[in-house]
Image (cartoon, grey):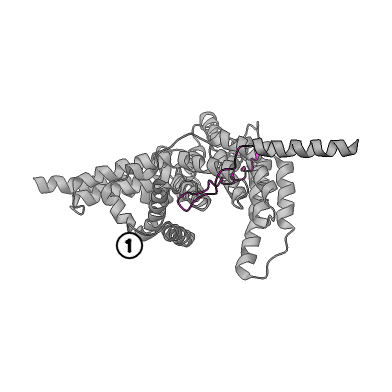
Amino acid sequence: MSGRILPVVTGALLLAVACRPPAPPPPTDTETPTVTAEPPPPKRIDRQLMAIADAVDPGEVQPLLTSMPAWLTSALKGRVAEEEDPESMLERVRDDLVAWSHASEGGDQSLGAFVHLGRALYLGERLVLAGKADDAELLVLLERIYALVDLPFFTSEKGFFQQSLGLFIDAAAREGLLTEQAQVGELLGFLDTALGRARALQHRTAARILRDHPDRPEIPAILRRLSEDAERDQQFERALELSTLALARNREPVARDFATHASRCYTALNLECGDEAAAKALAFPEPDDPKAAEEHKKRQQTLADEARWAHEAIDLAGKEGVDEGLRRGQALLLLARYADAEAAYNDLKARFPRDARPHAGLAKLAIQRDFDLFGAAPIIRAARGLDNRDREFYEISLGIAPGRLMAEVIPAATQGAAGEAKI
């Protein structure tokens, strides 16, 4: 039987081959075979970071460069050639950011120091507008720059930077030091717009990093900065949540990381959390380097102070005496619980109207929260006829004297001189 099957099978195979359509001819020299590119591997999604990104993302925000005056753009550009390649520009951003960090750490607040920060911002955003918005290195640098610009020193309407800048520009305009009067309005308008968008830009950039680059080593630092922002907004529990996550994401936390988390705990009045983190921070051995050893000792003292303030804020709540109330108000102020401190001092001011010390507390609050030397002056002035004007009261009075000089005396004297000149 097998002998009959074999010819049949062989014939069927030959028939199938004969009926099969001819194979396409091989590609000629003028034809290019189609090559299917391998799809990129899917991005890793971190659900936890994605949720944080969704919570902080304000949506689309225009870069600051879109409202920068052309003459200021030219001043910030420095020696950057229009055709310079993106990698070189990115390196310049890093260099300027490092230069600004060194200057600010050394207390340098000169125009040259601010130019470094401004140029880093200009170059970074120029790369974004050139199509590099997805570059992880660039996003990390820009997030840090926006966070620096968002500090209260710059952004507070009552802050020393904005008020001093306005006074300087006004004086320079009166003296004819600016070539064009229109530049004054353009600069002030740009600063108002730019500083108002810094927080939104920082959070927008942070959200992009958390979503698209969840494995970046800078993630813990970004979470710490978001925690700082929440604390500045008086959202203490949220700040503590973000700080806890930042520490958990840090593969090799050092003493400073545990100390930062302890501060968040104490500010949230979570003593158990603070004591645990402080113990871990202080468990690190004292470094051999003299500068690092000094920092270690300062950290010890800071943690001890913060623990004491948190205890006082809790233990002295509800006490009726003025001295206990002042101690609690001071503790809340030092913990940066500004709304609580303001309420405590206002309560004391209402219950002890002849006591100057609650007024001094409110003046300190204006200085610490808003860098507002000018706003602190009338608070102190209103309390000059009251009782208990202690050493701290007079120290605050002396401390705000330069602010009053700039806000009241110099403008009045200048206007008087201008009036005499017109006569």
Q: Amino acid at mark 1?
A: Arg
**Residue 27 lies in the magenta-colored region:** yes
In this rendering, the count of numbered labels is: 1
Compared with 98, 265 (above or below) is: above
Within 10 angstroms of label 1, few (less than 14), some, or many (20 or more) residues? few
For the residue pair 167 and 125, the one nearer the viewer reads as 125
Q: Which stretch is magenta?
A: 21-46
Find numbered disc 1 in the image and state the secondary structure of the residue it sits on. loop
Looking at the image, can residue 35 be seen? yes
Task: Give residue 155's position: percent from left, percent from top.
Answer: 42, 43
Say whether residue 265 is left or right of residue 84: right
Say whether residue 327 is left or right of residue 379: right
Task: Give residue 97's position: percent from left, percent from top.
Answer: 46, 57
Q: Badge 1 is on which residue?
A: 79
Give the quadrant of residue 380. top left
For the residue pair 106 and 230, the one nearer the viewer reads as 230
The overriding secondary structure of the stretch rendered in magenta is loop
For the residue pair 200 and 182, the one nearer the viewer reads as 200
Looking at the image, can residue 316 be seen? no
Task: Give residue 303's position: percent from left, percent from top.
Answer: 66, 52
